[in-house]
Amino acid sequence: MHLAIISQNHNLLLTLIFSKVNIIAPNLIDKDEAMDLRYSELDNNIGLIKLTGKLDIIGTGEIETKFAGHCSGDNIRVVVDLSEVDFLASIGIRLLTLTAKSVARRGGKMVLVNPIPDVHRVLEITGIPAIIPVYSGLESAETVLLGS
């Protein structure tokens, strides 16, 4: 058994490695580094989900239940604002794509808006715009959602 304790920016990361198992357990997460999700309603019953922080394994874990809850129901229209997401990992991409597909199966539509350049590059490289439309402005996203 190998035990490593790493302290960085007031975060304590305890890693236990057993023969073929690697467990990473965050014990303390700085509130300033936590993922934040804010939900509001736009005109015409369009939901707006504003994400802030890192959409990595920890951040995705913090918001995935609330995110899915705001994207539930039939024929919903949802805008996900990524303007304050400064990191997007594969687990975050998985959350976005699975949720968008679930929304579409129930007759709704989800779009992404305002990703920062680094996040937009990750979206492009992974082909996400073919699954979830990405717009640079809220107005164009609303127009598309109302037209669909």
Image: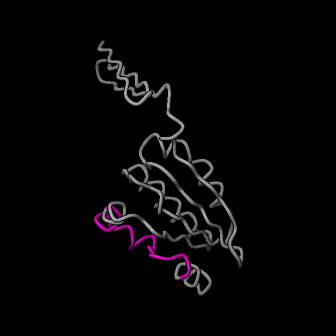
| Residue 122 placement (x, y as % from top left) | 32, 61
Compared across the picture, whether 15 is left or right of 144 comes to left
Residue positioned 53% across, 56% down in the render? 51
Q: In which quarter of the image is residue 102?
A: bottom right
The residue range painted magenta reads 122-139
Measured as percent of width and height from the top left, residue 123 is found at 35, 64
Q: Is residue 5 shown above or below 107?
A: above
Residue drawn at point x = 41 percent, y = 46 percent: 56
How many marks overall? 0
Q: Which quadrant of the structure image shows residue 107?
A: bottom right
Which quarter of the rendered picture does the N terminus lie within? Answer: top left
Is residue 127 inside the magenta stretch?
A: yes
Residue closer to the observer: 23 or 14:
14
Residue 15 magenta-drawn? no
* Residue 27 shown left or right of residue 108 in the figure: left
The residue positioned 38% from the left and 73% from the top of the image is 130
* Residue 42 sits above or below residue 7 on the image: below
Residue 115 x %, y %: 42, 65
Residue 55 pos. (x, y %) = 44, 50
Q: Going by the picture, which residue comes out furthest to the top?
A: 1
The C terminus sits in image quarter: bottom right
User: Is residue 90 placed above or below 106 in the rendered structure?
Assistant: above
Colour pattern: one colour
Q: Which of 141 and 64 is in front in this view?
A: 141
Kindly identify the residue that appears in the image at 34 percent across and 26 percent down. 22
